[in-house]
Amino acid sequence: MSILSRASTNALRAMSLEALRGFESAARHLSFTAAAEELCITQSAVSKQVKSLEDVLGAALFRRSGKGLSLTPEGRQLYEAARAAIGQLGAAIDRLLAVDRVSISVTTTPSFAALWLVPKLARFQAAEPGIDVRIDASEAMLNLEREGIDLAIRLNPQAPAAGDARPLLQERLMLVAAPAIAARIAEPRHILDAPLLVFHDPGARFAWMSWTQWYQRLGLMRSPKQACLYFSQYAHVLNAAVQQAGIAIGRTPMVLPMLKSGQLQVVLPEHAADGLTYQIVASSAQRPGVRQFRAWLESELAGEVIG
């Protein structure tokens, strides 16, 4: 006997897996554009997929405002269910398609994944060609066992708690800009003449990324006339800085590749400050492949210093 009601059975029949994947990606990024890029489809296609689910459920899944997207209560419920189901289905398919290979899953923040981890994965693959890695980029503090994730790379403002977590390195925060803009900033007051690149954080989750705190540290008074550009993804903040759009708050290790290449320079280096601590948490430390990935990760991060 089915454990589903007739209504839920009919609703599931009307939902496509592609629509659920499109919604899950859009909900994770809070961006139809980012979801389209991730799934290699158009933004219009993602919008239609979400609309099809809203039609079936008779409820809005997103709130749309000038500040961007946010999930409705119904959207949050569906996102949590879709995320778990798609993750479990993907893990099962991986096991069926590659029974002779080792597969591990890793979760971390979108910024750390895009700016640091993903560009280095080819080095891990070259060192461990028999291990497949699945990256889950999310700001959510996921339950590793429930989501079927082997390892998490997390930021923590406090010392590691007891258990399977230990520090990898501490963030270093600094102001950065493209060389042409950095050359015009010799002292703090010169920042007032340049646009600020702001990581938009409506929930005030990342206080260390606040320009208000930086202005207090520099002894400056914020002018309402100063131009600002706001971004929901930290990677876009740094990319805008490279394009000479303004000054950004840089975070190691994510900003290091752009500093080493000369695309960005540190502004007022004497005012750099410590940020949060990176930690690695493993739910299945003894699984094949997890120890190798963890050792590689620790080795790579240990070598990350500002040149």
Image (cartoon, grey):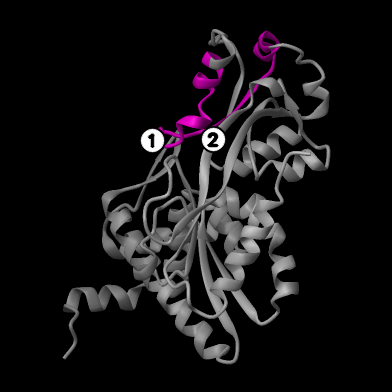
Q: Position of residue 133 (x, y in %)?
A: 59, 72
Instruction: Answer few, some or many: residues within 10 Å of disc 1's Cα (few below 14, many 20 plus, some between 14 and 19).
Output: few
Mark closer to the chain start, 2 or 1: 1
Q: Secondary structure at mark 1?
A: loop
Q: Position of residue 239 (x, y in %)?
A: 70, 40
Disc 2 versus disc 1: nearer the observer: 2
Tell me if residue 16 can be seen.
no
User: Which residues are drawn in magenta?
Assistant: 188-216
Q: Residue at x 54, y 73 (%)?
A: 290
**Is residue 204 rendered magenta in the image?**
yes
> CA gap, disc 2 to disc 1?
19 Å
Picture quadrant of residue 171: top right
Q: Secondary structure at mark 2?
A: strand
Picture quadrant of residue 3: bottom left
Q: Residue at x 41, y 76 (%)?
A: 88
- Is there a contact, CB below 8 Å, between mark 2 and mark 1? no
Tell me if residue 233 can be seen.
yes
Disc assigned to residue 154: none
Residue beneath label 1, please? 203
Q: Position of residue 59 (x, y in %)?
A: 27, 55
Front in this rendered view, residue 68 or 207: 207
Give the residue type at disc 2: Gly
**Is residue 199 rendered magenta in the image?**
yes
Residue beneath label 2, please? 275
Give the residue type at disc 1: Gly
The answer to whether 133 is drawn above or below residue 44 in the figure is below
Front in this rendered view, residue 92 or 155: 155
Q: Residue at x 69, y 41 (%)?
A: 255
The answer to whether 152 is drawn above or below residue 289 in the figure is above
